[in-house]
Amino acid sequence: SDLLNIYGEMRSNWYESGAVNDAFFNRVGTNVLLSGDAGTNWSSIYTTINSANLILKHTPEISFTNEATRNEVMANAYFLRAYCYFTLVRVFGDCPLLTSGFESEKQEDMYPSRTAASEVYAQVETDIEEALRLMPASSKLLHKASPAAINMLRTEYYLWKAKRLGGGNAALSTAQSSVDAVLKAGYALLPTFADIFNLSNEANSELIWTLPYIVNENVTPGTSPNFFAYYLAPNGDRTRLREAGYTEDEVPAGSHAQYVVPTQAYCDFLAEDARDTRTDVSVRVFEDKFLTEEVQIKRMVVKFKGSFANDTRSFDSDVPVYRLAEAYLLKAEVENALGNTDAALQNLNVVAKRAYGVDNYYTARTQDAIDNAIISEILKEFVAESKAWWAYLRFNKEFELIETLKGREGEKNVTLWPIAPACLNTNPNITQTEGYK
């Protein structure tokens, strides 16, 4: 989840360094990237891809008592490989396309070159279709692929293809049928936004695909296995916060100081309508009395605060990748791009009604106004859920709406990432992203 958050949130210009004053978060928050920064090393993603490749290579050789089980295993591997390559190609552009699987360091293709982005996108498309073909219709597992999860990725991919790759109405039509399948799959919005992230309710009807974090399985109490730990207050400040009348649940403290915080502008934007029930669930802002010379607690994301027991915080909040609210907003985006204004507003207002408690919150009917409303709802609904940056790019508004990208349209590959020296040094066939040193 660390990389997903860095790629999907940090460049949106809504985050900055916290008390630690980490240079990386200040740079990435203003869209200045260096090749040694976090996020420039793609090795962990390729490790996942290699696992998927080996599953696809060897699963056909294994005997199964139920063929549907084999198909589900294969579908999960295709889905995960598609998701990884879709992430890689949007982040880096051209990148090595590997589909055979490495089982020996002596294999001939150990040192691949970067493959043209068009070929990588084509592989993503093929893998999505194979995953959907093989996945049993009855599958609805939260932490694995399912028809709904695959169709969410399919919707996202074809929207990207339509808007960034020249796919036009044909791609929009495929995105439309994909998101319609999700909306008919039996998921349901929870009446209360806060309940989505309740630790006792992590299998709720709104969640489609999540990354699980469980104490004593993949979470050691007091450690920070996911990126959201860096938003919280440090343990050393708990006494002062208690004295001010806050409980550990109201003001989460953890094992790390604040490396990154939402900007004041973001917090103000989230709170611009007092009726919005999402604001206090997502972020918390502190007055000056909570600032000391040692620790500055200014703002924090509290949505994924984990659990607190035995005087220790465990960062065991599951991280949602896809949930139903996004399907409604993707549906609104598709319909608006197709010129179906009524359908776009209807789906947009489904999400808005839960947030603000009113019908028909959005009424403006121009295509651009609806697009901007969808972006606004993505920013408010999915704080720290790795959606903001991709929304700006998908709507082709990154140079219009992100302050630190305004006027930079002419810079080479400014929306792509450089490659880490570790990747370049271990493979002489990899070249740096053009525009970076």
Image (cartoon, helix red, strand yellow):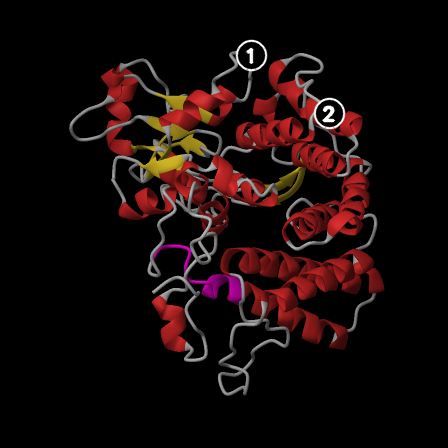
The image position of residue 311, as x and y in percent, is: 34, 31
Q: Amino acid at mark 1?
A: Arg
Q: Amino acid at mark 2?
A: Leu
User: Residue 234 versus residue 384: which sits nearer the camera?
Assistant: 384
- Residue position marked by numbered label 1 in the rendering: 275
User: Which element carries disc 2, helix, strand or loop?
Assistant: helix
- Can you tell which quarter of the image residue 327 is in? top right
Neighbour tally class for label 1: few under 14, some 14-19, many 20 plus, Cα within 10 Å: few
The image position of residue 320, as x and y in percent, is: 58, 40
Left or right: residue 55 versus residue 94 is right
User: Which element carries disc 1, helix, strand or loop?
Assistant: loop
Please say whether residue 125 is one of the residues in the magenta stretch. Answer: no
Magenta range is: 37-46
Q: CA distance from mark 2 to mark 1?
A: 20 Å
- Residue position marked by numbered label 2 in the rendering: 345
Left or right: residue 292 versus residue 268 is left
User: Residue 67 versus residue 429: which sits nearer the camera?
Assistant: 429
The image position of residue 242, as x and y in percent, is: 29, 18
User: In percent of the image, x 67 and y 44: which residue is there?
Assistant: 142
Identify whether 204 is placed above or below 280: below
Identify whether 276 is placed above or below 298: above
Q: The C terminus appears in which quarter of the rendering?
A: bottom left
Q: Nearer the viewer, mark 2 or mark 1?
A: 2
User: In percent of the image, x 65 and y 60: which residue is there?
Assistant: 82
Identify whether 239 is placed above or below 16: above
Q: Return the mark for residue 100.
A: none
